[in-house]
Image (cartoon, rainbow, N blue to C red):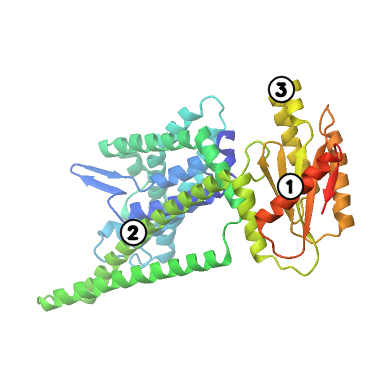
Amino acid sequence: MKSLSYLKNSPLRLYFLLGLIAIEFLMSFSFLGYVHIEPISITFAYIPVLLAGCILDPLASTIVGTAFGLSSMWKASADYVAAGDRIFSPILSGSPLSSFALSVISRALFGLLIGLMYTLAKKSPKHNNILIVIVSLFGRSIHSVIVYCFMGVLFPEVGFGVATALSGMFTPGNTLTSIVSAAIVLFAFCVMKSSFFKQVNQHFLAVENMRVFTKKTVTVTLLTVILTLVSACAIAFYFVYRMSYVLDVNGYDLTETAQYDILHIQTQFLFGILSLIFLVALILFMANRHTTYVRYEATFDSLTGVLNRNGFFPLCERILSYEEFNGEPMYFVITDIDDFKHINDSYGHPKGDEVLYKFAYMLQKTFSEKSVIGRIGGDEFAVMLYEPLTLEELENLLNDFLESLKCIGSHSISCSIGAVAFREKLDLNTLYELSDECLYKAKSNGKGQYYIK
């Protein structure tokens, strides 16, 4: 089970759950879920429930199973359905609660049971793939047994029961469905536990922590969703009206029952289209998150974890553009590790990389509040402190930082620091040049010194 444990608190879990619900509705309201080619009838609508139980957990498979039941209940509520299917409809069966239990609760129970079985299968460290296949092969039969058991208890007059489900277990259609289902679930399970998907999950977590959603983004998204729903409903009901009108013009006087059935079919079409739209939107959303991570990764230094030159300077410019100045000084600081070339030459580049990493860590630890930190080249780092500080407060921070460098490794290091104060908006290049001048003045005074202008 550890192979998929990374999904437990991952944003991917919610995306997959929503996607499987949408796929369930899409399959239920299209030929993707039900294929009939004489003499074989194949049902695939339960596969999203299996996928939810396998790659997520019993709660997810229960939710998807509930969606499966709701769609089945809606489809059974049309007057054109066969007499045997009407018991699944609370509207047509004459026993609303029993029909709801048969349609929805039985499918939810199926989702829960199959989820628990997958959970046990995934706990096996050596044979989980084989057990996943076994559970998947019997998934359809388990679903049939549960539904027919509910049918026999709630509607005994129909004459169906568990024996009915068992008698049809090995028909050609059921056997083919079980094999296809097992192949799909096993493929999804293997993909989900691959190192590739674990890396994708890490990318999504990184983007999630960036809090890229602003109020404006949320508002636009909500308006888009509302507009899509309204437009889809308008199109669906327009076609219902035009269909009825065309039939009426051609001399077909529709009864209320026929008009209801047309509306019922069009509503199924609407659900299918909305599910398809949602899936496309979800895929585009996930692609956008990946693109956001790629842009995010391109602005960070992979060794030290702080911003690189391409990320540091644009962010500083944005901060300068909206920062309010009230006369209190802010500071732009440049640091340079003393004798870093000697460290690389004497102890090797791995040791040099370790020093750079720990140096960046100490920078973040010291200047964590209201600052932007970046590696702008080699052993040179920059910090923009955009919270007003007194000169004494800055000196205390710099002294603490220089002292902390003595404890970062077996070889004590020091650095030179140049800092420039600014009380009004200045060009970033100007700040960089002034602080660089201060850095060289600090170097001229000896190692482990700082110079503030």
Say if 210 sits above or below 126 in the image: below
Question: What residue is disc 1 on?
Answer: 436
The residue carrying pointer 3 sits among few (fewer than 14), some (14 to 19) or many (20 or more) residues within 10 Å by Cα, namely: few
The residue carrying pointer 2 sits among few (fewer than 14), some (14 to 19) or many (20 or more) residues within 10 Å by Cα, namely: many
Q: Is residue 192 left or right of residue 374?
A: left
Mark 1 or 2: the one toward you: 1
Q: Element at badge 1? A: helix
Mark 3–mark 2 contact, CB under 8 Å? no
- Please indicate, yes or no, whether residue 65 appears anywhere in the rendered image: no
The tag earlier along the polypeptide, 3 or 2, is: 2
CA–CA distance in space, label 3 to label 1: 28 Å
> What residue sits 52% from the left and 45% below the top?
294
Q: Which mark is residue 272?
A: 2
Looking at this view, is 176 or 401 the one in front?
A: 401
Residue 331 rendering spot, x and y as whole percentages: 77, 56
The residue carrying pointer 1 sits among few (fewer than 14), some (14 to 19) or many (20 or more) residues within 10 Å by Cα, namely: many
Question: What residue is disc 3 on?
Answer: 348
Q: Amino acid at mark 1?
A: Asp
